[in-house]
Amino acid sequence: MLFKTIGVCLVVSIFTIAAVRLSCADVSEHAIKTIKTEYGVIYDCVDFYKQPAFDHPLLKNHSFHPQMRPSFQPKTMTNNVLRTINATEINITPLNDGGCPRGTVPIRRINKNKVHPNTPNGYTSGAVFAISQTKSSLSNIYNGVGAIVTVFKPRVMISQYSSAEIIIKGGTDSIVVGWTVNPNKYSDSETRFFIYSVAGDMHCFNSECGFVIVRSDIPLDFLLKPVSVRGHQIYVYKFFIFRDPKLGTWWLQVGGIEKEPITLGYWPQNIFTGLQTSGTYVACGGEVYTPATLPPPDMGTGLHPNGYLADDAFCTELVVVDNNNTVVYVTDTELYMNDDTYVAMDFRTKHPFHRFPFGGPNPN
């Protein structure tokens, strides 16, 4: 399977990225304003041109600016999916105090004195997946991927993580977008939005190597609240990545099931090799990691899916942007699980809105 090759390509530790990839500047030294959230997270408002993306060696002589927006907006599907699955879309709350000033972007302040365990990042040999993926074919042409994903707060221990995500891949390059509970990375056990990209030999979270932020009021690791409770209310969020046909940039949008999507920023074309043009693979589902010495963490609800909407974590409305820059439903997919502790299912033929439930293991 194509997905099996991904794990080999992307081995890296999230806590050694700065040392082996980029030496990012201390953005707090350039802060124009500082914002502290109710959860104690500090964001520094830094000039657009001083954000970490521009430490990338291929972006030294760029012509980007804070007002950049996509030259083209794919027309997304419009339907009553929320009513059909009896779900509520999460509303993201911007940073308090009006967010960062115009022309600046929020960058999370990292405690440089905190020592993190050397825990592997996603797509290591130890990562476990339960996903729906497109079948391997070099003829696949994907200019984007999007999905609606249920949002949960799986239980994990320190040195573990649990995520739900969409993926697009071209060659050895990948873009991953979704939510995660990752105590080592974020110093809490909250459900947070995240992005992860592999561009050439660089493997990075959020804006660490090449992602350009354009919003001044919403950070890249925002909290997703409230979260779903199994058997009760379902909360969902939409993630969408698409390639600008004019500029070649890969844009990231979130939300927008019933409202206008939020454009957070973009990956410039020239940081990629395999994703300089279209991707050839997309996927959606769950991912977890644990050291061998710990019991397996929860994925999704912490239980195997049973097919009932209120009981399962799932992806739905999985779409791609095709060669005509039209948003279409994914049809040629297969399930991939590399550990039978976790399960993915395909409800393509049993529900008007295709669902791909995933989850496990049974908690004790």
Image (cartoon, rainbow, N blue to C red):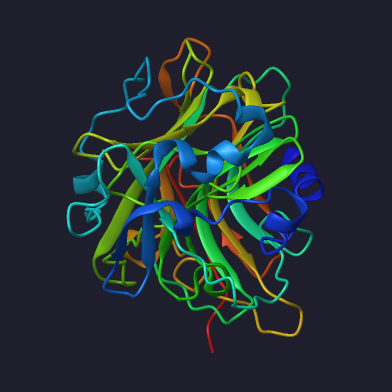
User: Vertically, is 7 above or below 320?
Assistant: below
Q: Tell me where residue 4 appears, x and y as whole percent.
A: 77, 46
The quadrant the C terminus occupies is bottom right
Q: Which of 70 and 295 is in front in this view?
A: 70
Q: Is residue 171 above or below residue 151?
A: above
Question: Which residue corresponds to the image point at 61% horizontal and 74% vertical from the top-left?
Answer: 160
Task: Give the farthest residue toward the bottom.
Answer: 364
The quarter of the picture where residue 68 lies is top left
On screen, residue 134 versus residue 148, left or right, reads right
**Residue sitting at x 75%, y 48%:** 10
Q: Is residue 173 visible?
A: yes
In the image shown, does 189 or 350 lie closer to the viewer? 189
**Quadrant of the rendered image containing residue 254:** top left
In the rendered structure, the answer to whether residue 118 lies left or right of residue 324 reads right
Residue drawn at the location 36% of the way across and 45% of the way down: 105
- Foreground pick, 143 / 222: 222
Whole-percent x, y for residue 109 in the image: 46, 63
Residue 318 visible in rendering: no
Count the labels in the image. Answer: 0
